Amino acid sequence: MEGTAKNIRLKQLRKESKITQEQLANYLDVDQTMITKLENGTRNLNVTLIEKICNLFGCLDTYLMGEDDDHIPLNFAFRSNGIQTEDLESIAAINKIVMNIRYMNEMIGD
């Protein structure tokens, strides 16, 4: 992928999860315009944002940054448009646990 892979991946992950830019901005504690700039490639992700985004979408940083195409999505769905920041924080915490379990299973060869 090209240099904008991370921007394309961010937008793709957000849309696949049916999360709005505003909801993602609230979760990341940034302004909505920052999400637009990140997705358009006019701003770069910092380490803190990368970690939070990867936890939310259940992906590795190498996938988000376009360095790796290997991704097994951790799918979730909402029945409501009223997704709150707390909901996204809970999903991110659960995804982090699942990703850690996957990593441990890979390490022990399971």
Image (cartoon, rainbow, N blue to C red):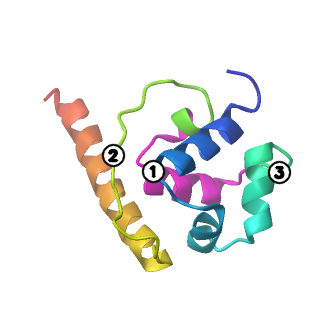
Marking on residue 57? 1
Describe the element under mark 1 as helix, strand or loop: helix
Q: Which quadrant does the N terminus fall into?
A: top right
Q: Position of residue 99 (x, y in %)?
A: 32, 47
Describe the element under mark 2 as helix, strand or loop: loop
Mark 2 highlights which residue? 74
The answer to whether 27 is drawn above or below residue 48 in the figure is below
How far apart marks 1 and 3 lie (CA) works out to 20 Å
- The magenta stretch is 45-62
Mark 3 highlights which residue? 43
Q: Position of residue 87 (x, y in %)?
A: 40, 73
Q: Say which of 107 and 44 sits in front.
A: 44
Residue 78: quarter of image: bottom left
Q: Residue 46: say if magenta.
A: yes
Residue 49: quarter of image: bottom right
The answer to whether 88 is drawn above or below residue 75 in the figure is below
The answer to whether 71 is drawn above or below residue 44 in the figure is above
